[in-house]
Image (cartoon, rainbow, N blue to C red):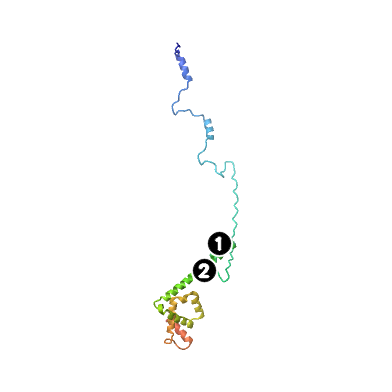
């Protein structure tokens, strides 16, 4: 039989308890010395976003000079010299506005002229089409007018043209034709009335001067 372990004496029990580490209570772990804490703090990563940014100047250092930015080379001339196609003229005010825009876009003389050569004919054509449309509308209004239009329009137009040819100056005839006002119903109405008023029943004899004076009174009754 194995002999039972002898019971330790009181002195032996006390020495054994001192040699065996006891479990520390929760939350009471021992902290490292201050020197160790400082060393650990240096090796720990900093907070997010705290990294050094390019261009930051550290103590004792000088900031490097920034690179010099060269000014943008300008293509636009000091003054544009636009040329119009033969037989065509540009409006000075339009060219001034266009030149300001071309300078803001930094267009060279060649580039600005090229844009103008492409756009100007289209603008001119659109202008002509609008004028033709207006003249066509005036003609339509004259042909359908209640007083001078309808079946009587050809006769009224003939009387108006004869009166204009008789009393109108070449300059007036040219103005009416070029502007298209000769197609306007009010213009045809006025000259048709002049033609009827200076016919055989209303014509004032005494030569061309008398006829012109009578026409002026009819157009402006307030004249003496």
- Residue lying at 49% horizontally and 70% vertically, measured from the top left: 129
- Residue lying at 53% horizontally and 30% vertically, measured from the top left: 36
Give the mark, 1 or 2, whose residue is nearer the N terminus.
1
Disc 2 residue crowd, few under 14, some 14–19, many 20+, Cα 10 Å: few
Query: Callout 1: helix, strand or loop?
Result: helix
Task: Locate residue 172, reporting x and y percent.
Answer: 49, 79
Query: Callout 2: helix, strand or loop?
Result: helix
- Residue lying at 47% horizontally and 18% vertically, measured from the top left: 16
Q: Is residue 16 above or below residue 35?
A: above
Circle 1 is placed at which residue position? 102
Q: Residue furthest front?
A: 151
Q: Is residue 27 left or right of residue 101?
A: left
Circle 2 is placed at which residue position? 125
Disc 1 residue crowd, few under 14, some 14–19, many 20+, Cα 10 Å: many
Q: Is residue 216 above or below residue 35?
A: below
Q: Answer whether labels 1 and 2 touch (C-beta < 8 Å).
A: no
Residue depth check, mark 1 versus mark 2: number of the one nearer the observer: 2
Quadrant (top left/top right/bottom left/bottom right) for the C terminus:
bottom left
Q: Is residue 5 above or below residue 147?
A: above
Task: Locate residue 188, reporting x and y percent.
Answer: 44, 78
Residue 220 in sight here: no
Task: Locate residue 174, reporting x and y percent.
Answer: 51, 77
**Closest to the observer, 85 or 29:** 85
Q: Quadrant of residue 72?
A: bottom right
């Amino acid at each position: 039989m194995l002999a039972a372990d002898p019971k330790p004496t009181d002195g032996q029990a006390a020495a054994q308890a001192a040699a065996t580490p006891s479990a520390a209570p929760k939350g009471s772990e021992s902290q490292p010395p201050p020197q160790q804490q400082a060393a650990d703090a240096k090796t720990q990563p900093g907070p997010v976003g705290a990294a050094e940014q390019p261009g930051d100047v550290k103590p004792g250092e000088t900031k490097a000079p920034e690179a010099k930015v060269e000014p943008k080379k300008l293509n636009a001339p000091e003054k544009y010299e636009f040329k119009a196609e033969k037989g065509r003229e540009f409006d000075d005010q339009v060219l001034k506005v266009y030149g300001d825009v071309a300078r803001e876009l930094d267009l060279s003389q060649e580039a600005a002229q090229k844009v103008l050569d492409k756009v100007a004919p289209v603008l001119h054509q659109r202008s002509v089409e609008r004028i033709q449309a207006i003249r066509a509308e005036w003609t339509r209004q004259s042909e359908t007018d209640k007083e001078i239009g309808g079946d009587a329009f050809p006769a009224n137009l003939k009387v108006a043209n004869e009166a204009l040819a008789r009393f109108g100056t070449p300059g007036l005839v040219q103005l009416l034709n070029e502007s298209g006002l000769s197609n306007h119903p009010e213009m045809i109405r006025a000259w048709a009335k002049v033609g009827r008023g200076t016919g055989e029943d209303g014509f004032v004899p005494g030569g061309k001067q008398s006829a012109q004076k009578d026409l002026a009174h009819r157009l402006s009754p307030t004249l003496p």
